[in-house]
Image: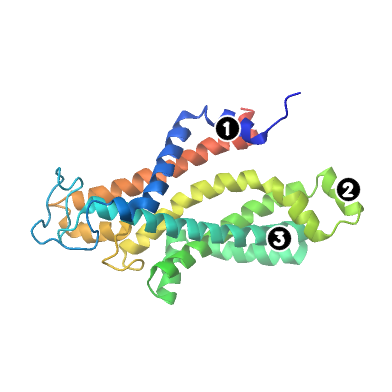
Amino acid sequence: MIKYSPVKEFWKNFRQKKVALIASSFILLLIAIAFIGPYVAPYDPYEPNYDAILEGPSMAHFAGTDEYGRDIFSRLIVGSKISLLVSFSAVFLGLILGTVIGLISGFFGGWVDKIIMRFCDVLFSFPDLLLAIAIVAILGPGINNVIIAVMIFSIPSFARLVRGATLNAKENVYVEAARSMGASRTRIIFKHIFPETISELIIFVTMRVGTAILAASSLSFLGLGASPETPEWGVMLSSGRDYLGTNTHLVLMPGIAIFLTVLAFNLIGDGLRDVLDPKTKNN
């Protein structure tokens, strides 16, 4: 008798999604680069070279150099770690807090649900980027505050998603059986209800990382994120806009990096949704 393996079943279905598989390979490569980037970058991303100012792409500098002669390719490699770290940290924290809030709201209902959902509605009334700008303006510029800002505007999205899944899951027969057998609320929530939300969370997290990268880059572009000398993709875009008409590579290279990374996460999310969401599998 062949034992059923959810992991093998998932991999069997996911590898049929060629586009998502390619996007996943790209993200895995990017994560590897983020870890080993400082050791394999051909040049020091911080050290200026005034003999190579504003050079275009060449064999010596694959992506050209910036206004200080720093190698853009090396800065992109090192900057990948910053962009991924900020986005993953913010989404992970938002995931934890949003999941807990959503489980509490959906499970207990009543006035608890109303208070939590009205708070989420207030946050939803602001565009994500505008809310992030307001938060960073209050806390002050810096990478840590960017993480906090992106985390805060991610919380209501996770909370609403988990709340909806919780409302559906708590009506299941096995939840009623666990309740009738005297199982504690904590056990019911985390043992019987939370597992029902995991597939939806995985899909949403993947897409949310792309949103977080865009938000973090936008804040840095506006001067509210990383410091000007930091090789962060949004900072590189901001410093390159003054040379847009003459040295397009200063904007083009970090722009392509952001575009490909966000696109890859969205494609992975689409592939995961096709595999994990039963509604799409039945279509």
Q: Do the numbered discs 2 and 1 sit on residues whose CB atoms are within 8 Å?
A: no
Which residue appears farthest toward the top when viewing the image? 1
Q: Answer with mark 3 or mark 2, whichever residue precedes in sequence.
A: 3
Q: Residue at x 39, y 46 (%)?
A: 30
Q: Dot 1 surroundings within 10 Å: few (below 14), some, or many (20 or more)?
A: few
Identify the image quadrant of the C terminus.
top right
Q: Mark 3 points at which residue?
A: 105
Q: Position of residue 51 (x, y in %)?
A: 8, 58
Q: Residue at x 40, y 53 (%)?
A: 35
Q: Answer with mark 3 or mark 1, whichever residue precedes in sequence.
A: 1
Q: Position of residue 10 (x, y in %)?
A: 61, 33
In this rendering, would 25 be left or right of 61? right
Q: Mark 1 points at which residue?
A: 11
Q: Name the residue under label 2.
A: 177
Identify the image quadrant of the N terminus.
top right
In this rendering, would 71 be left or right of 95? left
- Distance from Cα at disc 2 to Cα at disc 1: 33 Å
Instruction: Tell which tag, 3 or 2, sits nearer the viewer.
Output: 2
Q: What element carries label 1?
A: helix
Q: Nearer the viewer, residue 124 or 175?
A: 175
Q: Is mark 2 on a helix, strand or loop?
A: helix
Q: Nearer the viewer, residue 199 or 214?
A: 199
Which residue appears farthest toward the right when viewing the image? 181
Instruction: Tell which tag, 2 or 1, sits nearer the viewer.
Output: 1
Q: Which residue is drawn at 57% across and 55% down?
A: 157
